[in-house]
Image (spheres, grey):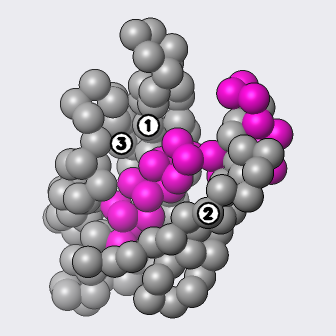
Amino acid sequence: MTRIEIQYEGELHCRAVHGPTGTALMTDAPPDNQGKGESFSPTDLVGTAMGTCMLTIMGIYARRKGIDMNGSRVEVLKEMVADPARRIGRLTATFTMPALLTTIQRAALENAARGCPVHHSLHPDVQVDLIFRYA
């Protein structure tokens, strides 16, 4: 179990502190929801969590199998919807991976990404699209 302490700082800003390390991050409401967009919004953190989780799970698999995936990255696009309630409607994750990976390694890493616990924790109404590019 991990403890995260969150304090409301006013002006729609919150400060979250990771209990084990003391690392802090700030959030702000997005401009389309009364905020200034001065930091990650809470829903931005959902996309961030999914992208970092997927790369981490892929990294665990790669380390175990001796695969070098250094330099891999993911860009997550978050799309909000308003009906029937304001929520995340779609997350599109576009991965850029090393070109030298074999077909078998690529398939295994893509499968590992799909095993991300954050992805599996999302409501089924959130559409998740994964795109893999090998550069």
Q: Is residue 24 something one can see in this rendering?
A: yes
Above or below: residue 8 compared with residue 59: above
Question: What residue does disc 1 label?
Answer: 91
Q: Secondary structure at mark 3?
A: strand
State if disc 2 and disc 3 touch (CB < 8 Å): no
Q: Which image quadrant is residue 110 in?
A: bottom left
> Label 1 vs label 2: CA separation?
27 Å
Return the disc, 3 or 2, that comes first in the chain's sequence: 2
Residue for badge 3: 130
Which percent across, then down, holds residue 59?
33, 77
Kind of residue indicated by mark 3: Leu
- Residue visible at 69% across and 27% down in the picture: 33
Q: Which mark is residue 118?
A: none
Q: Give the x, y percent position of residue 81.
A: 49, 18
Which numbered disc, 1 or 3, marks the residue that appears first in the sequence? 1
- Residue drawn where x is 37% and y is 83% of the image: 68
Q: Which residue is mark 2?
A: 7
**Main SS, magenta residues:** helix
Q: Residues within 10 Å of mark 1 (few under 14, many from 20)?
A: many
| Label 1: which secondary element | strand
Q: Which kind of residue does numbered mark 1 sit on?
A: Leu
Give the magenta-colored segment's residue range. Answer: 32-56
Q: Secondary structure at mark 2?
A: strand
**Residue type of the residue flagged with mark 2:** Gln
Q: Nearer the viewer, mark 1 or mark 3?
A: 1
Q: Nearer the viewer, residue 26 or 68?
A: 26
Instruction: From this view, report whether residue 19 is shown above or below residue 12.
Output: below
Side of 134 where 127 appears, left or right: left
Q: Position of residue 48 (x, y in %)?
A: 50, 55
The quadrant of the picture occupied by the N terminus is: bottom left
